[in-house]
Image (cartoon, helix red, strand yellow):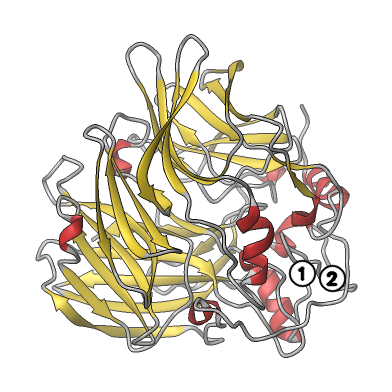
Amino acid sequence: MSLSRRSLLSAFAAAGALAAAGPALATEPQTAWSPGLDNAPVDGFNEAAMRLVHGRAPRALEGTHFRNGPGWFRYADSATGHWFDGDGFVQRFAVADGRATHAGRFVDTPKRRMEQREQRIIAPGFGTRGADDAPVQAPDDINAANTSVMIVGDELWALWEGGSPTRMDPRTLATSGIRPLRADLAGMPFTAHPKVEPNGTIWNLGIYGQRAIIWRLSADGTVEDAQILNLPSRSYIHDWAVTERHLIIPLQPWIHERMTAPMVDGYVWRDDQPFRVMVLDKNDYANRRIYELPAMFFFHTGDAWEEADGTIRFDLCVTPNAQFVSQDARSMISRDVGQTPSAELVMATLRPNGQAELQRSTVFGEFPQTDRRRQGLSRDLVVVANDRAVSTLEMMNWRTGEASRFNFGADQMVQEHLFVPKPGRGGEHESWLIGATLNARENATELHVFDAAAVSDGPVATWRSPYRAPLGFHSTWRGA
């Protein structure tokens, strides 16, 4: 099946993503999340020392924690229409010799340069209609580079859903520009959830309409293979999973049924349809199987693995419907967070006989993370962050069925925490967990380190920045 930049741009136009309308009026947020939805300083944050306010830094912990998320939402007379459309803002937490520093920079995208020059929202986005005169010729013209980050070779890539990675210097956070993965595939979507196998192979999806491009890259970012396949439905796909032998693409019943602008308005929740899971053989994409589960909505998977008898397991965080993405994440910009309940962590089991099952848990939250050394391999642990009903970090052990949690208190907004292996140790529990919170009471961003074996004991170390930074989405860690 042929694939080109022109075909992708046509798909964007047909979906209404390039349609224009007047800018949304800016109003100040009136919610408890307001500090995390303010614009970051236009020039970001120069590297600043963070103050150790609790505990003692683990002596062997050295490296850099990178985070990405939207950091610019409004100008004087216009605002984005959705939390997901803010300009990408990458934060760098460097830990060494028991000390921590923080820095932050906007990703210098064509979209941001255009809007900063005009001092208004121009580009269309997932939930933003855009301006009448938006000069959009290709998907990367509206690339916000605002969702995730990954280290590839000597570069830091800022990732978005609908276009190319954007290259940054991991030390200075200076932007080098768009990174076309291959000349003939420039501008093709590369989602914010690539999967990196223990040998360094990078797998990723790119979704446009009812088609997906499956990317396979070497550890240095060279494209080894890129193939197109048709999907059973136009489902919203933000994340997926990979085992040693299979690719797992969840197809939820939030379906893009109407060509309109903004794109989010074209999605319809179909609770009369099942939650489908498409499983593909890595060596033969035509060898596939479809499983069915009850209707539910998800953003993120934890990880997947398969057992000797062919049973596949993967965890994910689910809600009963798509209210958060379709309504609440829009109103966050101007009014309210809404009443969407926290997502529940569940385990999906796909049997060789075609049966599919769900195992529920007592753990609620989002941004599930596992030990990345075990990508596609059997493991027990997954950690989630919950900043909706209560501000907790929660760890689930699927083998024992036990959960442990730490409550940060009502003033903290908890963000994704990563597993960081302790030097010379191989077990999942033999790790630290590292991540950030926004402390509204102290008006500051904090960096926390937990012992993965004792989450309920609280952080072993906490550093506090002299200011607050925007909330982020996804992160990565590079050891020293």
**Residue 292: quadrant of the picture:** top right
- Amino acid type, label 2: Ala
Residue linked to disc 1: 123
Residue 95: image location, x then y, percent:
23, 70
Residue at the image point whose x is 70% and y is 70% from the top: 111
Asked whether disc 1 touches disc 2, contact meaning CB atoms under 8 Å apart, the reply is yes
Looking at this view, is 478 or 416 the one in front? 416
Looking at this view, is 82 or 153 the one in front? 82
Residue 157: image location, x then y, percent:
49, 58
Above or below, comparing residue 54 to residue 449 in the picture: below
Residue linked to disc 2: 134
Residue 376 left/right relative to 343 = left
Residue at the image point whose x is 45% and y is 32% from the top: 242
Residue 144 at least partly seen:
no
Above or below, comparing residue 458 to residue 8 in the picture: below
- Mark 2 Cα-neighbour bin, 10 Å: few <14, some 14–19, many ≥20: many
SS label for mark 1: loop
Residue 221 left/right relative to 184 = left
Number of labels in the image equals: 2
- Mark 1 Cα-neighbour bin, 10 Å: few <14, some 14–19, many ≥20: many
- Amino acid type, label 1: Ala
| Of pointers 1 and 2, the one earlier in the residue sequence | 1
**Residue 154: quadrant of the picture:** bottom left
Q: Quadrant of the C terminus?
A: bottom left
Above or below, comparing residue 400 to residue 90 in the picture: above
Residue 51 left/right relative to 289 = left
SS label for mark 2: loop
Residue 184: image location, x then y, percent:
71, 42
Above or below, comparing residue 235 to residue 137 in the picture: above
